[in-house]
Image (spheres, rainbow, N blue to C red):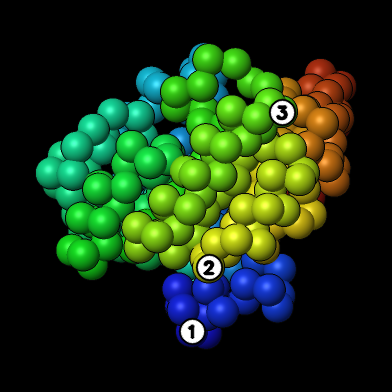
Amino acid sequence: MKRITINKIIKKKNTTPIICLTAYSKTIAKIADKYCDIILVGDSLGMVLYGMETTKEVKIDTMILHAKVVKNSAKKSLVVFDMPYRTYTNKFIAYKNASKVIKLTKCDAIKLEGGKKIVEIIKYLTRKGIPVMGHIGLLPQTSRNFKPKGKNFNQKKQIFEDALAISNSGAFAIVVECVVENLAKKITKNISIPTIGIGASKHCDGQILVTDDMIGLSDFLPKFVKQYSNLKKVIEKCIKNYSRDVKLRRFPSYKNVYK
Ligand code: KIV
């Protein structure tokens, strides 16, 4: 099966919703690959898998390990690598790190958080042939609190200007995180590249969620997440039953024994 191209993703704007999820492992990547246009190896893995307080602690080499297996497992979705905190402090550092990432993981693109301040970095990377996805609104790598953005005039103006700047810098899509509905709608209408919303209403061109939140494996359940299952409960039931079976010598049974 052929991998979706960035051009095809861009062409979906105003026509077909773009489906995106995060993946950090082979199992999730393989399943997500059947249904998603884009799989993001998100630095949210710091909190979700490694119990870190924030994404600031995530190291590029940890991300590379996860991205390698995700890229190997996903055959048709575009795989995007989320550049960790302080790996793109200027355009030269960004290029050095992004080149290493692409070389080692074979990911199709990278994602950077930020607005107007990172325009020169995006221009430089895209000129050098590295596709970039932007990320505006709530920026987990630098935000001090987890509150919806764009509630007042100044914030709205700043985020809208960020969206225009990123769109004009050569990025192929933008994640819009946790912004009020009317701002997400305005951004989506006024920029030429797809917006991928997370907590940013149905008016975006696509949607993304952290898979572990959506399947009920994490402890994070903000208003914008729809929980499609509660896998923590399912896993607990399995482990409880296994523990009971071992205690009662019901496991292993004759079915699990070599003769
Ligand atoms: O790290 C991540 O998973 C992300 C998504 C929330 C978009 O950046």
Residue beneath disc 2: 192
* Residue type (three-letter) at the residue carrying disc 3: Lys
Residue sitting at the far bottom: 1
Frontmost residue, 55 versus 240? 55
Left-right relation of 228 to 133? right
Query: Which class describes the residues within 10 Å of circle 3: few (<14), some (14-19), or many (20+)?
Result: some
Left-right relation of 223 to 184? right
Residue labelled 3 has its Cβ within 8 Å of some atom of ligand 1: no
Q: CA distance from mark 1 to mark 3?
A: 42 Å
Residue beneath disc 3: 151
Q: CA distance from mark 1 to mark 2?
A: 25 Å
Residue for point 51% across, 49% down: 163
Q: Nearer the viewer, mark 1 or mark 2?
A: 2
Q: Which numbered tag is attached to residue 2? A: 1
Check disc 3 and report its element: helix, strand or loop.
Answer: loop
Q: Are marks 1 and 3 in contact (CB under 8 Å)?
A: no
On the image, the x and y values in percent for residue 146 come to 64, 21
- Res. 50 in view: no
Query: Which class describes the residues within 10 Å of circle 2: few (<14), some (14-19), or many (20+)?
Result: some
- Res. 126 in view: yes
Q: Earlier in the sequence, mark 1 or mark 2?
A: 1
Frontmost residue, 122 versus 45? 122
Residue for point 72% across, 23% down: 219
Residue labelled 1 has its Cβ within 8 Å of some atom of ligand 1: no
Frontmost residue, 40 versus 242? 40
Check disc 2 and report its element: helix, strand or loop.
Answer: loop
Q: Which numbered tag is attached to residue 149? A: none
Query: Which class describes the residues within 10 Å of circle 1: few (<14), some (14-19), or many (20+)?
Result: few
Q: CA distance from mark 3 to mark 2?
A: 24 Å
Residue for point 52% across, 35% down: 158
On the image, the x and y values in percent for residue 124 come to 20, 55
